[in-house]
Amino acid sequence: MARILAACARWKRRCDANAKWGHMLREVGGKLAEELDLLGLPEVVALAKDAAQLGEPQVRLASAIGHRVGVTEEEIALSSQDMIDLIGASGQLGGKLHMMTRALADRLEPRTAMLPNKSLVQLCSHLGALNMFPHRLAAALDTVLSQRDCGQFPVEDRLRLLQAFGRLRWRSPAVLSPLLESFSASVLDGLGVESLGGIIYELYRLDIWDENLANAVCSRLHKILVQNGVGHSHVDILSGKTAANLLLALSYFAVSEKELQRRLVQELLRSNKVPQEALYQLKTFEMAVRLGHTSVTLKDLGGLAARWLFSVRGASGIPEPRGESAFAEEVSNVAKNISWHHQAEVEVGPYLLDFAAVSRDGYEEPDGWDESKPGRSLARFCVAVEADGPSHFYRPHGRPWHWTSTSKLRHRLLSAMRIRVAHVPFYDWLQLEGLAQKEAYLMELLLKAHSTEFASLSIDPRAGNARGPEQRALR
């Protein structure tokens, strides 16, 4: 059975085949999960790599692999590359193997300095795919990578490393500064549209405004998509997801690239196949354009594109990710206890918000509350309660805490809609003891937010940057 998976994996690697083997692979994986103890640990590692290569979720097999590795001391004899491959496989197979991954991370930490560059990049990439941040291993990786010359890495590895840091929300100046500097003009000239778009998107995810790099990338995208792209479709070389990511990043930085943004919207409109996972980005972009957070306007995009964006605004898609759900639910329940009006999961553009209204004078609805206009009443009398869990902040965590670019853009756009927002940081919430303290804390926070004046949101036409929370260079 292990040989069946190995043969299928070899076939896929050599032929890049898109064979429909799902049912057969799941059957074989399920039977292997029952008899995995018959294999030696090196065979288990090879099996995990082959199963991951095939890309078919194998939850039972993943669980068996985690148990097989976790209940024995044999992993001491595993090579560093074996451990890295097992961490990567755990992300591909779909199992919840956090305990195994953390155990392997602890084993890898003292070996980090001896890993070759390729293995370091693989390890960071696997951790990024899993969104796991073992602190001891991360500290070791930070030290080792800062001592390596990233400019000597293959370009593909540099791009993978940048993507991994973006996925992990990991702002490490010692690693990222030389990494970004290594993308010279000659390197950028050799990159395709997908890779160039990926660089801009990771700058957004890491909230790094590198003006020289951003302008260099945008000029090359402009040349490919605008100057050379008139009358030609780039759907095959520019995926819908990358186009949506680019639009989101350009709107966040308010880059003065009107023609590029117009072309990206046209490409998406022409393809008529917007992937579901890109709807969140497109809805955010539409909201940013409508509220003046970009250098491009609906008029610049043209009537057809404007109507298409309006249809995207109302499209149903994958719900917004709601991380730290237990924390968010607790905050919502406390807000409900102290509010004269509370409404959960209200859809506002791409966001789902909890609204709460409190008053020191009691629980009566104020004059002006209109049930026939709930949206206007919520914005006028209520405050959106934002439970800011760990995913809202950059790593490594600690004071000062820095909001991610996603959280900052969300705050800017909601404020531009005249919606007051009260942020409840998880690190403050954890210090509160008992329901009474939490109710008092949240009451003061909501009252303060409701009395706060709105900051203006405008575009500086000289710089092309949206005024708002500071966009930070990497230090």
Image (cartoon, helix red, strand yellow):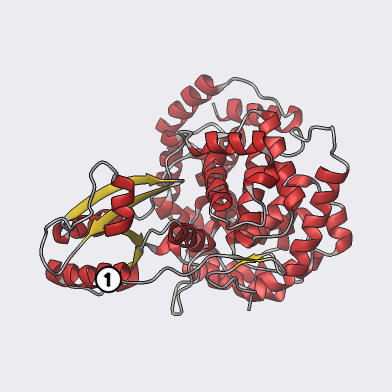
Assess disc 1: are there few (<14), some (14-19) or many (≥20) residues with their C-alpha within 10 Å of its C-alpha: some
Residue 41 located left or right of residue 459? left
- Residue 458 in which image quadrant: bottom right
Residue furthest out toward the front: 368
Of residues 104 and 161, the one nearer the viewer is 161
Q: Where is residue 301 in the image (x, y as percent from the top left)?
A: 68, 43
Viewer can see residue 327: no
Q: Is residue 218 above or below residue 27?
A: below
Q: Residue at x 77, y 37 (%)?
A: 237
Mark 1 = which residue? 445
Residue at x 83% of width, y 53% of height: 220
Direction from residue 304 to residue 259 in the image, left or right: right
**Residue 439 visible somewhere in the drawing:** yes
Q: Position of residue 217 (x, y in %)?
A: 78, 57
Q: Is residue 82 left or right of residue 423?
A: right
Quadrant in the picture for residue 17: top right
In terms of secondary structure, where does tag 1 sit? helix
Above or below, 82 against 441 in this view is: above
Q: Does residue 401 sit above or below 234 in this rendering?
A: below
Quarter of the figure that contains the N terminus: top right
Residue 7, percent across and down?
65, 27
Quarter of the image that includes the C terminus: bottom right
In this rendering, the count of numbered labels is 1
Q: Callout 1, which amino acid?
A: Leu
Q: Nearer the viewer, residue 242 or 371?
A: 371
Q: Left or right of 357: which side holds 36?
A: right
Give the residue at x 59% y 20%: 20
**Residue at image point 69% right, 52% down:** 198
Q: Position of residue 2 (x, y in %)?
A: 56, 30
The image quadrant of residue 185 is: bottom right
Which of 387 and 308 lies nearest the eye of the viewer?
Answer: 308
